[in-house]
């Protein structure tokens, strides 16, 4: 019995070491289980361009004077007369906006993102002075760099988008702003300046010598081409003769209406009568 006990004592340290080793292995495996790397979540997909536009429009309101000022600038560029671009929704601005809405099948008086989107307010991140400077750099004549939207700036803008095939209605777009900001030489004006156009002053003050315009077309029969010819005869540059109202035609018509203090907006009866079209 004594011999058995002595043998047991001899192997006891080894047995203890074995128990410690086994316990350590189990603890290590348990710790490894606790340290498992969590599965990473897939990154959220980037927002679409349309979603970004919707978010931008949702943050805009007609109660914001900065938004109203953009609306006024864009109405003017589109051939309407909203009055001074002061950020105030005054009667003249409201009338111009209603005319725009009527012509674009939007409920007159709408004050939602529908109207803002149609005008392209979300694309107008440039100040007027920036637009003037960019147009001048590209060889167009926007008049003084004064941050005031006027006939010269509008004419230069319409010439720019017309020359580069960027639209026919004057409404600003992503393509137009990209082209304005581009350094690509293809956007440089390829047409020499008109020698008859004054270098200084407002282009609205310049009217070429009036020639005779005689027509048998009545007010109700007048088409775009007829009105173009009448405007040309009175010294207004309508651009190439076309059956559709091009930006240059709209600008010429607007300038004529402004010069003659006629109602602004399309080929209305007062304007056609003033141009020489006969009563029905």
Image (cartoon, rainbow, N blue to C red):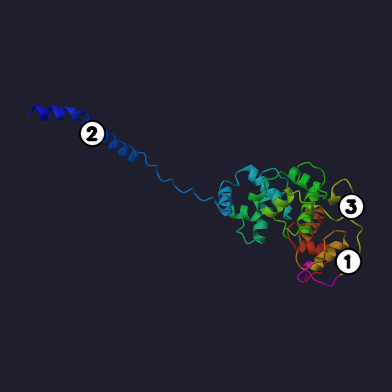
Determine whether the residue tagged by mark 2 lies in a helix, strand or loop: helix
Identify the image quadrant of residue 275: bottom right
| Residue annotated with mark 3 | 197
Percent x, y of residue 219: 78, 68
Q: CA distance from mark 1 to mark 3?
A: 22 Å
Identify the image quadrant of residue 15: top left
Q: Is residue 261 left or right of residue 178?
A: right
**Residue 247, numbered circle:** none
Determine whether the residue tagged by mark 1 lies in a helix, strand or loop: loop
Of tags 1 and 3, the one toward the viewer is 3
Q: CA distance from mark 2 to mark 3?
A: 104 Å
Q: Which class describes the residues within 10 Å of circle 1: few (<14), some (14-19), or many (20+)? A: some
Mark 2 and mark 3 residues within 8 Å of each other at the beta carbon: no
| Residue annotated with mark 2 | 19
Of tags 1 and 2, the one toward the viewer is 2
Counting residues from the start of the chain, the first of labels 1 and 2 encountered is 2
Report the residue that reaches farthest toward the left.
Answer: 1
């Amino acid at each position: 019995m004594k011999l058995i006990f002595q043998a047991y004592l001899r192997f006891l340290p080894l047995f203890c070491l074995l128990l410690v080793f086994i316990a350590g292995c189990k603890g290590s495996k348990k710790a490894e289980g606790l340290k498992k790397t969590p599965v990473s979540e897939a990154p959220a997909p980037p927002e679409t361009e349309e979603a970004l536009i919707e978010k931008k429009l949702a943050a805009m309101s007609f109660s914001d004077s900065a938004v109203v000022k953009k609306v006024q600038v864009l109405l003017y560029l589109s051939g309407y007369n909203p009055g001074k671009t002061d950020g105030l929704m005054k009667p003249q601005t409201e009338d111009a906006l209603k005319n725009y809405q009527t012509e674009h099948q939007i409920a007159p008086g709408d004050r939602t993102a529908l109207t803002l989107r149609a005008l392209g307010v979300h694309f107008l991140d440039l100040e007027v002075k920036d637009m003037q400077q960019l147009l001048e750099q590209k060889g167009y004549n926007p008049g003084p760099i004064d941050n005031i939207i006027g006939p010269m700036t509008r004419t230069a803008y319409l010439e720019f988008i017309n020359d580069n095939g960027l639209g026919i209605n004057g409404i600003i777009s992503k393509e137009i702003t990209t082209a304005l900001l581009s350094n690509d030489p293809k956007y440089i004006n390829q047409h020499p300046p008109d020698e008859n156009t004054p270098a200084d002053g407002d282009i609205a003050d310049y009217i070429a010598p009036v020639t005779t315009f005689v027509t048998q077309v009545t007010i109700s029969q007048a088409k775009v081409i007829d009105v173009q010819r009448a405007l040309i005869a009175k010294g207004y540059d309508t651009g190439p003769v076309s059956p559709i109202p091009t930006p240059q035609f709209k600008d010429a018509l607007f300038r004529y209406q402004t010069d003659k203090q006629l109602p602004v907006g399309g080929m209305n009866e007062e304007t056609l009568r003033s141009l020489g079209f006969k009563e029905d």
